[in-house]
Image (cartoon, grey):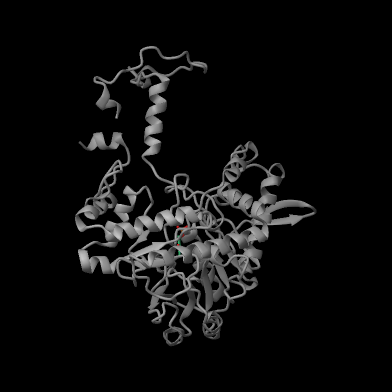
Amino acid sequence: MFKQSRSPVRVITDAPEADVGSTDVPDELKRKSLSLPDIPESEAVRHYTRLASMNFGVDNGPYPLGSCTMKYNPKYADRIASLPSATDIHPYQDDSTVQGTLEMMYDMERKLASISGMDAVTLQPAAGAHGEFTAMLMVRAYHRSNGEERDEVIVPDSAHGTNPASAAMAGYKVIEIPSASDGSVDTDALKAAVSKRTAAFMLTNPNTLGIFDKNIKEIAKAVHNAGALMYYDGANLNAIMGISSPGKMNFDIVHFNIHKTFAAPHGGGGPGSGPVGVKKKLIPFLPSPIIKKADGKFVLEYDNKESIGKVRAFHGNINVVLRGYAYILRMGSEGLKDATVRAVLNSNYLKELLKDGYDIPYGDLKKHEFVASASRLKKEKGIKASDVAKRMIDFGIHPPTVYFPMLVDEALMFEPTEDCSKDELDRMAEALNDIAKEDRETVLRAPRNSSVSRVDETKAAKDMIFSTRYLRRRQ
Ligand SMILES: *Cc1c(COP(=O)(O)O)cnc(C)c1O
């Protein structure tokens, strides 16, 4: 941007005095020149403000990405996570000097266990997918301890892609079963698939269609009768917390996404946090170290013979865990329940408003998310789900998840979280219903109000350019 407005680029001639002492640097390592831009503060501030406004995030407006649970991240959690007592400590410090942090972790484990109905929790995994992988290693260790080698993991076709990927990475053969016509688990297909080879059944409940599986007890029974474990993908925990729990549904193992359910940023590739909760029989296999409380002191215990070992350097992304902890404490159990009720209400409200312009296949009453379809627009006008999504950008509204789950044609998957107001939902619905009435030409030209228009998404994934320096080197 600066390059466009002035040429040649101005270079600093008057560098400030160094505020650190000098050292002896060999001549050949010394820079001959240093080109720093020479611009007034006003221009620097405006440059970064302009860049910041080109972006969109949860601080700009609702971010209704289905499955992702992009909540507004309350500022108090950020403030707490940036206190020196949270940032100026190191995992190599002696346990006795970080008692506060260890106590927070110890208490968080217990709070998550209580919310999920599990008996113990590890905070180590760095995200949901990592939690799934950690859990699959524990599933294997559990069966081995019983003298069994089971080699299959069953997933329904509505599962998030990370479920089969994590099972496969842990060395399991993935068996996919079709959904029933109402979008829930086909219990006959499941019963036909489970056997002595089944290590676990992975399920998201409510699933990615926002449908709570009413047969969950029967499903758990069929899986347990075959000696297999029930795995709960907790990405949708925000649809049931405070009202039901994976424990009540007879699951044995659960992952949480702190960055989804409990409000911490999904850091654009940055840290997440994916703790795993387990029932008693799986406790011996939890990753090391375990936080123990002895004589009023918190200590890390590494001597756990049956543990699957470490899955992450140190103790996990504790600063993300801390944000989630702050959220849980601030909300309290009534607050968490209220968040669930609001999320479910918001989803159903938006779904009803969208019935004007879109088809909503699968089920009537939804949980916290629902899947609309643009297939009618595709048939009538050649407008696809991705075109609708691009057009939403012109209305200043972030698009939903598209083309997932795959069992809905031209899927637009919405998850308006509990922090969406009625006004925001009304605005979103009005824009979407307006788009459904627009002509093909207008929609296919979108987006026109964004800093970049349509990008080649395949090229972006296959041909990554990480920095301007990298780009220059390739030119
Ligand atoms: C997000 C998500 C995951 C993976 O979680 P990450 O924290 O993104 O690794 C797994 N399952 C479902 C249903 C999800 O929505």
Image quadrant in which you'd find residue 26: top left
Q: Position of residue 405 (x, y in %)?
A: 37, 68
Q: How many marks?
A: 0
The quarter of the image holding the C terminus is top left
Is residue 288 toward the left or the right of residue 161 in the image? right
Residue 134 seen in this snapshot: no
Is residue 33 toward the left or the right of residue 24 in the image? left
157 over 385 or under it: above or below: below
Front-most of residues 317 and 212: 212
Is residue 306 toward the left or the right of residue 396 in the image? right
The quarter of the image holding the N terminus is top left
Image quadrant in which you'd find residue 141: bottom right
115 over 18 or under it: above or below: below
Q: Residue at x 36, y 12 (%)?
A: 13
- Residue closest to the far right: 295
Query: Which quadrant of the render holds ligand 1?
Result: bottom left
Q: Residue at x 53, y 61 (%)?
A: 343
